[in-house]
């Protein structure tokens, strides 16, 4: 949905409010009040959905940046592994690199609910 859709919903609520003020019959006024509430509820839901979508997109971007940083650290660990003099150090750096790569994958993989 878009900002224009939200504007449309708010405009309909405003229209219903104005029609309710102008109504001379009680049942028409009540119908307009119910319509105003319904349009405002729809607009509020739309705003929440837009806000939630923006939050999800921001978090996804942040996770991607963090995953990239983890991959960079994993590459550094592999480089250190190649430069290490002892087998134990090489193994430790490779293990750390593998763990960092897995964390990067887990960070950007879609989560199941």
Image (cartoon, rainbow, N blue to C red):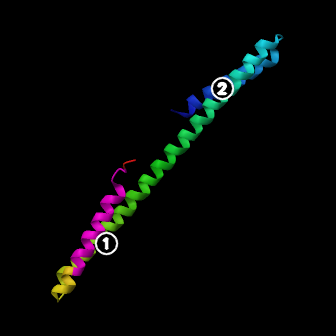
The answer to which of marks 2 and 1 sits earlier in the sequence is 2
Q: What's the mark number on residue 38?
A: 2
- Would you call the spot at circle 2 few (<14 residues within 10 Å), some (14-19), or many (20 or more)? some
Residue found at x 35% / y 62% = 67
Residue 84 percent location from the top left of the image: 19, 86
**Looking at the image, which residue sits at the far bottom?**
85
Horizontal side, residue 69 vs residue 28: left or right: left
Front-most of residues 18 and 45: 45
Residue found at x 33% / y 59% = 106
For the residues labelled 2 and 1, the Cα–Cα distance comes to 52 Å
Res. 44 image quadrant: top right
Residue 28 percent location from the top left of the image: 76, 12
Q: CB atoms at circles 2 and 1 under 8 Å apart?
A: no
Res. 100 image quadrant: bottom left
Residue found at x 77% / y 20% = 18
Residue with the mark numbered 1: 73
Residue 73 percent location from the top left of the image: 31, 72
Horizontal side, residue 38 vs residue 62: left or right: right
Q: Identify the secondary structure beneath mark 1.
A: helix
Instruction: Let me know if residue 84 is in the magenta part.
Output: no
Q: Identify the secondary structure beneath mark 2.
A: helix
Q: Which residues are magenta?
A: 92-111
- Would you call the spot at circle 1 few (<14 residues within 10 Å), some (14-19), or many (20 or more)? some
Front-most of residues 32 and 113: 113
Instruction: Let me know if residue 102 is in the magenta part.
Output: yes
- Tell me: residue 56, above or below residue 43: below
Per the picture, the main secondary structure of the magenta-coloured stretch is: helix
- Tell me: residue 107, above or below residue 15: below
Residue found at x 59% / y 31% = 6
Front-most of residues 77 and 4: 77
**Looking at the image, which residue sits at the far front?**
113
**Looking at the image, which residue sits at the far right?**
24
């Amino acid at each position: 949905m878009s900002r224009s859709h939200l504007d449309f919903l708010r405009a309909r609520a405003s229209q219903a409010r104005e029609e309710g003020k102008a109504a001379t019959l009680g049942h028409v006024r009540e119908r307009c009040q119910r319509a105003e509430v319904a349009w405002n509820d729809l607009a509020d839901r739309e705003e929440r959905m837009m806000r939630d979508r923006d939050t999800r997109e921001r978090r996804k971007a942040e996770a991607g940046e963090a995953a990239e940083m983890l991959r960079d650290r994993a590459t550094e660990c592999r480089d250190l592994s190649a430069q290490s003099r002892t087998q134990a150090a090489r193994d430790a750096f490779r293990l750390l690199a593998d763990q960092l790569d897995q964390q990067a994958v887990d960070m950007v993989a879609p989560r199941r609910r």
